Image (cartoon, rainbow, N blue to C red):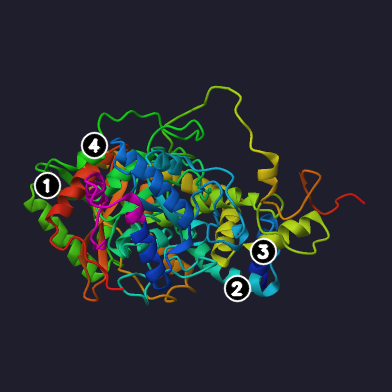
Amino acid sequence: MTDSNDYIKYIADLAKLSLDDSEIQSLADDMRDIIGLMDTIKNIDTEHIDATEHISRVTNNLREDNPGDSFETEKILSNSKKTMENCFAIPKMIE
Amino acid sequence: MDITKLTIKEARGLLDNKEISAVELTRMYLDRINLLDDKVGSYLSVTEDMALEHAQQAQNIIDSGKSSLLTGIPLSIKDNICIEGTKTTCASKMLEDFVSPYTATAVSKLLADNAVILGKTNLDEFAMGGSTENSAFKTTKNPFDLTRVPGGSSGGSAACVSASLALGSLGSDTGGSVRQPASFCGVVGMKPTYGLVSRYGLVAFASSFDQIGPIAKTVEDCAIILDSICGNDSKDATSLKYEKDSSYSSSVSGDIKGFKIGLPKEYLTEGLNAEVKESLYKSIDKLESMGAKIEEFSMPVLKHAVPAYYLMSSAEASSNLSRYDGVKYSYRADNCKSFNELIGKSRAEGFGKEVKRRILLGTYALASGYYDAYYKKALKLRTLISNGFNEAFSKYDVVLHPTAPETAFKIGQNTNNPLTMYLADIYTVAVNIAGLPSISVPCGYDSKGLPIGLSFTGKPLGEKDIFRAAANFEAEFADKFRVPAI
């Protein structure tokens, strides 16, 4: 199933998951069965049916545009593993 | 005092009559957790200091004569619902160290009623699963048989109520995650209409499906909790503006003579365990003897609910979980030399296998070339399922069905077979697809002594109908709450 492994690798890359070969193999096996189940809906005739993205019974449920308190910077940064000068830190992106 | 049969309503009486103090009641639950939770494994963290502080505040309110129904009542919260200053792990390595900077609206409402929060309960990682085996930290056991699963994903919440390690709990239900574990653990679990309870502070899995719901020992106790947590919230744009004319807890009274109940034929086919089926038919006889009129009806599209649900919910999950990138608050892989490496490695190391499967399925369903065949097709099935229920509710007050096709299975039995796990959601997912309220109540026990659940599903905002039907059934069900021997 090399083709399907390659495709799972492609999907994993889209999803930003750096999986090793053994994990790709194991997930490709699972996904084959799972996608088989998903394929059972392919032939149902839904040509004239509208799609329902969201079942919510409200539209444009917006609050008043009043300013509120923000979270304290320190509190928000405290959950990050790496911060610098009151910012989140990431590896250098520009050489 | 024996707390194994205590309900929220009875505890309210004891507290108000000063037969026990809120601190004493909380202490009893904390002691029982210390004694038994090593066996059950329902809690991921116990917030003892906070609980005792809440209990003292609650006692002051009780002493002033101003208590509400939940004042001083010890509850637990599923660990994907935030409480400021406490860990919210979602049972994932990804959020192992995450401390919530704010409190979920549903919990704020419980605290405004001076309920006591005992701790956070175990779940399948990010609420993805039906056995709680997908937790990164521990396996919760079913209190009726410690070699079996409690169901999931709110397995910790259901097990802790069943084992009397809390009087009630908040779970979350995306595809059955409150009702199925309630069924496996012999307690009552309720999923409200989509939008009735604010999702603010509930960690998002599939936003158009997720809904917080109560788990307790009785239907009335679930209604009492729902009365506290429901209501419009400006912090959740999908929250409904809905004024109820009376409390849910008062809706449990009144009989069901002439109540029209529909039973979908598609749920009675292969895959339904014989003992569960027998229990369902006994329950139907019971309901008919109480004056309800029960009729089978057909809704063929229900057969496609499972694949439609997994396509839509996984697509939403793949988008929601893109926020876990190792930068702001999640697990961060070591020694990454580039930003892309940081994201890819953090996600690969931080997420468990089931979460990866769902992200892959969701990304696949949304990928160019597959979107129309999978995701859009599922959205159209959502329309058909919703229309099907609308039609059913033009004829029936409630729809009746099993909660799960079988009783609790052995730990490890299905861990390597995700497809079997997905197919077992057949009776619960359609409710979430259509955004309906549904409640699971115990209706029997199989030959191994394992609980069986029965579900009443209502029309949108039909909570009172399902509470009334379930409470009437519960009152007549001779074996209503068995205490598991742990």
Residue B343 falls left or right of residue B273: right
Q: Amino acid at mark 4?
A: Ser
In the rendered image, residues at marks 1 and 4 fall on the same chain: yes
Residue B174, given in percent of the width and then of the height, sits at 44, 51
Q: Which mark is residue B293?
A: 1
* In the rendered image, residues at marks 2 and 3 fall on the same chain: no
- The chain under label 1 reads B
Q: Nearer the viewer, mark 2 or mark 3?
A: 3
Disc 1 on helix, strand or loop? strand
Indicate the chain on which mark 3 is placed. Answer: B
- Residue A87, horizontal then vertical, whole percent: 77, 44
Residue B14 included in the magenta stretch of the image:
yes
Query: Image check: B181 left or right of A92?
Result: left
Task: State the SS at label 3.
Answer: helix
Res. A43 visible in picture: no
Report the front residue among B205 and A15: B205
- Which of the two discs, 3 and 1, labels the residue nearer the N terminus? 1
User: Would you name the residue on which mark 2 appears?
Assistant: A26
Tell me the quarter of the image containing the C terminus of chain B.
bottom left
Q: Which residues are magenta?
A: B1-26
Q: Which callout, 1 or 4, points to the residue nearer the camera?
A: 1
Q: Tag 4, which secondary structure?
A: loop
Q: Which residue is mark 4?
A: B394
* Label 2: which secondary element: helix
Query: Which mark, by number, is residue B348?
Result: 3
- Residue at image location 47% in from the left, 73% down from the top: B415
Q: Amino acid at mark 3?
A: Ala
Can you tell which of label 3 and label 4 is closer to the viewer?
3
Q: Position of residue B483 (x, y in %)?
A: 24, 67
Work out how far the residue at label 4 is from the one at label 2, CA to CA, in angstroms: 47 Å
Look at label 2 and name its amino acid. Ser
Mark 2 vs mark 1: same chain? no
